[in-house]
Amino acid sequence: MSRENSLVTAQWVEDNLDTDGIVLIEVDEDTTAYDKGHIKGAIKLDWTTDLQDQVRRDFVNKAQFEALLSERGVSNDDTVVLYGGNNNWFAAYAYWYFKLYGHQDVKLLDGGRKKWELDSRELTAELPTRAKTSYTATEQDASIRAFRDEVVAAIGTQNLVDVRSPDEYAGRLLAPAHLPQEQAQRAGHIPTAASVPWSKAANDDGTFKSDDELKDIYTEAGVDWTKDTIAYCRIGERSSHTWFVLKELLGQDNVKNYDGSWTEYGSLVGVPVALGDERGSADEGGN
Amino acid sequence: MCGATEGGLSLDGVNVAKEAVIQGQVLRGSEPVPNAYVRLLDRTGEFTAEVPTSATGHFRFFAGDGEWTLRTLAPQADPVDTRVVAATGSVAEVQVLVAG
């Protein structure tokens, strides 16, 4: 992938508001934001109810995803353009999710809802109507989703990128201030993980930094471009933002998002945990 | 800086004793700015949270004890940084003026 294939500007979206075959989808952490106003024609996905299994901690399955997109009127050959608040965290999460289920043509609006609003572009409360479709998903693409065992196996061998804030990485905080406090049993980070807060990849207006700037940021943090990479955060949404940067903007092969992230890893029995600002070593703690 | 000022955002339903609240209003001149974004940066300048302002230009964070910076972005205005100290059990009221 590349920036040209995976990212569109606010101007591009405005120019294509009435183009057939393009579906705008808003996905927000604040699931009420859409209801107050959204980009004309955009539909809404609620990450807590639409994209999560309501019993197990997992995603909706293939059949549920197919039913969801069919009901919302999304076709397999549509160009899906995702955007949202909070610097596109949950839009990036949805982007990764669409890729997981094999949607071919997905793009992210650079800067998301914030950039759109800071540009003083129009929002509407009008709800679009879309005819139902018959959407077909693929099986989950295991090449972009990491599970706990491969995360443990990656310690000291692959790139692990911790995209939480430095205080969460060091174990001084279990969750950032202001956000919902889903927590793990233990604080700290996965030994050998590099600390690259997601925010390093974005400008204040929510747009992504240039490819050259991004390469420098991860290189300086110790990411080895010859190795496979797993990104994680607390619940897997901020790390989707970083997954998007590494896989889609910079075109790295073999980048996975660990959606279990720290709320799973930090509650596992017997796994190694590192505290403090240093990366720690592979033989630290654990059994 | 502490204590809700008259006309500030209502604290109904907020357990102030357990929270380190930072809240306020973004204004352009005397006009509220409803489509601004306020970023909460920690003592090292690291992003912690971000909220859009309400229809009346108001915002609120549930921060932690210590020093914070609010970085306010508004249409057609340069970002404005405002230093603020938050403490559990109090409300830090902030008024942010953007240019233009």
Image (cartoon, coloured by chain):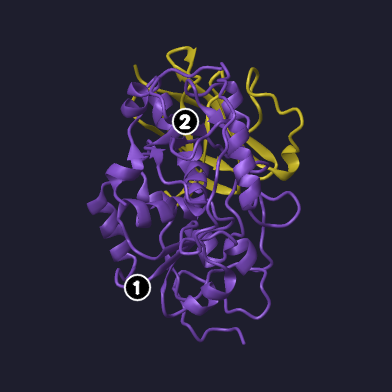
Of helix, strand and loop, which one carries label 2? Answer: strand
What residue appears at the point 35 percent right and 44 percent down from the top-left corner? A6
What residue appears at the point 58 percent right and 29 percent down from the top-left corner? A33
Give how far across and how far down residue B35 sits, in percent. 47, 22
Q: Determine which of the numbered discs, if any, sits on residue A24 in the image.
A: 2
Q: In the figure, residue A197 lies in which quadrant?
A: bottom left
Q: What color does chain B have in the rendering?
A: yellow
Q: Amino acid at mark 2?
A: Leu
Of helix, strand and loop, which one carries label 1? Answer: loop
Q: In the figure, residue B28 lies in which quadrant?
A: top left
Q: Quadrant of the C terminus of chain B?
A: top left
What residue appears at the point 55 percent right and 55 percent down from the top-left corner? A236
Q: Would residue A6 be found to the left or right of residue A263 on screen?
A: left
Q: What color does chain A have in the rendering?
A: purple
Farthest top residue?
B30
What residue appears at the point 65 percent right and 81 percent down from the top-left corner? A270
Closer mark to the observer between disc 2 and disc 1: 2
| Res A205 visible | yes
Farthest left residue?
A212
Rate crowding at label 2 as few (under 14), some (14 to 19) or many (20 or more) other CA atoms within 10 Å: many
Mark 1 — residue?
A227
Front position in the image: A233 or A2 = A2
Q: Chain of mark 2?
A: A
Front position in the image: A206 or B72 = A206
Q: Is residue B47 above or below residue A196?
A: above
Give how far across and how far down residue A281 sits, in percent. 46, 82
Rate crowding at label 1 as few (under 14), some (14 to 19) or many (20 or more) other CA atoms within 10 Å: few
